Every structure is written in structure tokens, then in C-alpha cells.
Image (cartoon, rainbow, N blue to C red):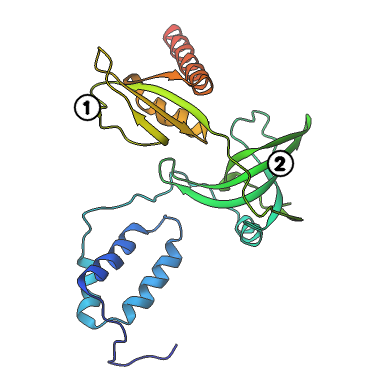
Amino acid sequence: MLGYGDFSPVDLNPVELHTLAFLLETFEPGTPNHGAVQRLFQKISSWLPPDPRASLASRRQLVRIDLQRRDNELIDPNVYRKLEEALGKHVVQFQYLAPGQEDGIPRTHTIQPWRITFDTWRGHYYLDGYWLEVSGPYGRFTQNRWQQYRLGRILGDGFEVLPMRLPPEEPRRKRWPLAYKLAPHIARGGRVTAHFENVEIHAADTDGWIPVTATTTNLFRARQILLSYGAGCVVIGGPEIRAEVANEVAKMQEMYAKFDESK
């Protein structure tokens, strides 16, 4: 690109400079797309007059978004390349090592890849796709449901973009009902964080607990969020999330009991 000498082709007002500084502060090293955002920032700042350019580094933000990853997993570059080729277009097949597989043997997953997301709550990249089938040591099984995959657990070797094209519209997502109560100290004044879809806040019961109903398309994430409230949340329905949370709490009770016995 040719230089401009003393001429500055871009002049930003204070609001626009704050916005640029916000991007710089948000996409710090270790965040998604850090390199691309930094290159864009450098290009735009090089077009600014000297004084506004110098002021960018000192513009502190009142609000910051935490986009830092919570792990040091390496994402295979081949996974990125193949997903760029296939995302929203073609069915893919890859080896995936799920954390719950005690045998440590990757399974072959065939999915429709629709999007890649960064979960700010868990701090991981996820491939959001419609799971068609899985095969492994115990056979091949049809799934036909939505599933999220951590990109760091997808193996680059053997990743295939298949000829089969994706349908014009995404498959419909299943939704599960949620019903839970939040303790008075968490939902004081009826203020409840809307973690889910279709959130409705109901009148407090006689003990001051706030009933909440909602829906979710991701039972795993719903379980993790509700468990994060600790003793300040009681899940009363629907049946699927109630069973998920009750099962997890029972496992924790068993673990603590064994730990106490071993002391």
C-alpha cells in the first residue's frame, strides 16, 4: 500500500475513537480473532492524524468484555481450514475425543456444520452443528439432533468435507421447559438474569423465593448455569432438566461422602 506522507485520510470523532479503543482493549492477546482485529486496528490508526492516533492508547473503557479462553487447547489449523470451506454448505466428518469417553478412543462424527461460536461463559470455541451419526468401537448410531463440539477436541487428521450439501434452512432445534426457584438474596426485587429463552418471572412464594420459567435449546448449558447458583437455586421442572441437576447433585453428594470417609 502506498504511503500518504503527512496527509491523514481518516479523521474520527471522539465517539468513534472510543469505539476503536474499545475493540483494541477487548480483543487483547489470547482472545478470538486477536490477530485480525489488531491488523485492522493498525491499518485504521495509521490513517489517523498524529494526535488522535496517540490518544488511542490512553482511552480507558468503562465497560470491558472478557473474551479470554479458559484453556490452552491447541486448535488444529486443518480444522479451521476445513470448516471455513464447509460451514453452512457441506456435511463434514471428523474424529472427536469427548471428555466423557473413558477409553480415550476418538469417535467418528458426521454432522451438518452451521456456525462457530465463542462461549464467553465457558471460554471455549464451539462448532454448533446438527449431529447426523456417530461411529466407534461399539457400532454406528443415528443421532439427528443438535450438538456442540469444542474445536480443540476435533482432530485435524482425517477431517473430511463430504459432497452432501446442507439443506436450505437449519433443522429445527428441540426446546426443553425449565422451572426453578431462586433464593431471595439472588433475586432481590424480582431482578433475574435472563440466561434462557422465554423467561417469565413469577410472584415470590411465602418464603420469598422467586419462581422462574423458561425454555432452553441446550440442556448441558442450562444445567451448568443453574448449578452455578449453588444452594440459591432449586430446580422444580421440567422433567429433563430436573433429572439432569438431581443426578449431578447426587454424584457430588456421593463424592463428598467418600472423601469424608477417607479422612
Seen from the viewer's position, the closer of residues 263 and 2 is 2
- Near mark 2 (Cα within 10 A), the count class, few <14, some 14-19 or many ≥20, is some
Image mark for residue 188: 1
Q: Residue at x 27, y 92 (%)?
A: 6
Element assignment for label 1: helix
- Indicate the quadrant where residue 203 lies: top left
Q: Classify the position of the C terminus by image quarter.
A: top left
Seen from the viewer's position, the closer of residues 208 and 26 is 208
The mark that comes first in sequence, 2 or 1, is 2
Residue 5, given in percent of the width and then of the height, sits at 31, 93
Q: Residue at x 61, y 40 (%)?
A: 146
Q: Residue at x 62, y 57 (%)?
A: 87
Element assignment for label 2: strand
- Indicate the quadrant where residue 110 lies: top right
Image mark for residue 139: none
Q: Residue at x 30, y 67 (%)?
A: 20
In the displayed structure, 39 sits above or below 158; it is: below
Mark 2 in CB contact with mark 1 (< 8 angstroms): no
